[in-house]
Amino acid sequence: MTETRKRKRDLIEGRAALIVIDIQCSTFAAIPDEKRSIAHMPDFAVRMARTKGVIDRAREVGIPVIFIQEFHRADLVDMGRETDGDEDVHCLDNNPLTDLAVEQLGILPNDYMIQKRRYFAFYGTDLEILLKGLKAETLILTGGLTDVCVHYTFVDGHQGDYFCRVVEDCVAGSSLAAHQASLNAMEYLQHGAIRSIDAVLAAMDAQA
């Protein structure tokens, strides 16, 4: 059997971009769990709020931040198959809770923002063009859901030959089991993909 020698990759290879996925006003709204259109694991909002520290550090060291927003037309013409599974109608354009969590995340008017109609942040958006313009090689992912939009965006990034990293403390899934299964699946694709917030912040500092 031929031994495969794998190079140990740095947390950040080349230039990085921070991708903040679907942290919207609904994340922090006082909605009973049973009335949410999408299930949340315990401490979901706490995990999302931690992303603010990663955003602030990225700004300090010059790493671009890209905010992704799931967004559907109120007449549901672009909802597609998204309600065929566990999820109900969500993220409609006439619902203020669909807005990005500007205050909680400290979003600035000149930040990069991308709206998506599907779970993959690359699908039907200009994310790929933006990343090429930024000359990004490493994508640092935060947000939710771990088992849906984060996982699927990670896979697209992996297929596009990006180095993909997930800030474990700043993602959350529909359940603990689904969250952990997706972390395991992403780590399977790229060893060292799942990193703590402390490790990510230290890597960002080293980039400065």
Image: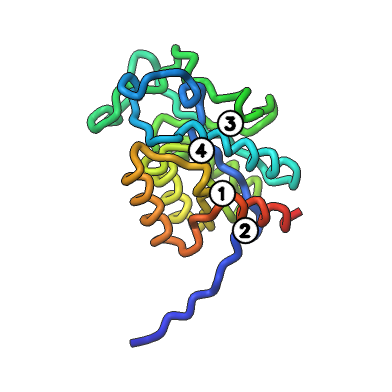
Q: Residues within 10 Å of mark 2 (few under 14, many from 20)?
A: many
CB-based contact (under 8 Å), mark 3 and mark 2: no
Please name the amino acid that badge 4 sits on: Arg
Of tags 4 and 2, the one toward the viewer is 4
Q: How far apart are marks 3 and 1 (CA)?
A: 16 Å
199 on left or right of 91: right
Q: x, y (%) of residue 172?
A: 44, 40
**Residue position marked by numbered label 4 in the rendering:** 47
User: Which is nearer the N-term, disc 1 or disc 2?
Assistant: 2
- Between 52 and 93, the residue placed more toward the observer is 52
Mark 2 residue element: loop
Mark number displayed over residue 140: 1
CB-based contact (under 8 Å), mark 1 and mark 4: no
Q: Distance between the residues labelled 4 and 2?
A: 22 Å
Please name the amino acid that badge 3 sits on: Met
Whether residue 77 can be seen here: no
Residue at position x 56%, y 42% in the image: 19
CB-based contact (under 8 Å), mark 1 and mark 2: yes
Name the quarter where the N terminus is drawn.
bottom left
Mark number displayed over residue 12: 2
Whether residue 132 can be seen here: yes
User: Which is nearer the N-term, disc 3 or disc 1?
Assistant: 3
**Residue position marked by numbered label 3 in the rendering:** 113
Please name the amino acid that badge 2 sits on: Ile
Q: Which residue lies furthest to the front in this view?
A: 42
Of tags 3 and 4, the one toward the viewer is 4
Residue 12, quarter of picture = bottom right
Q: Distance between the residues labelled 1 and 4?
A: 15 Å
Mark 3 residue element: strand
Q: How crowded is mark 3: few (under 14 residues within 10 Å), some or many (20 or more)?
A: some
Please name the amino acid that badge 1 sits on: Ile
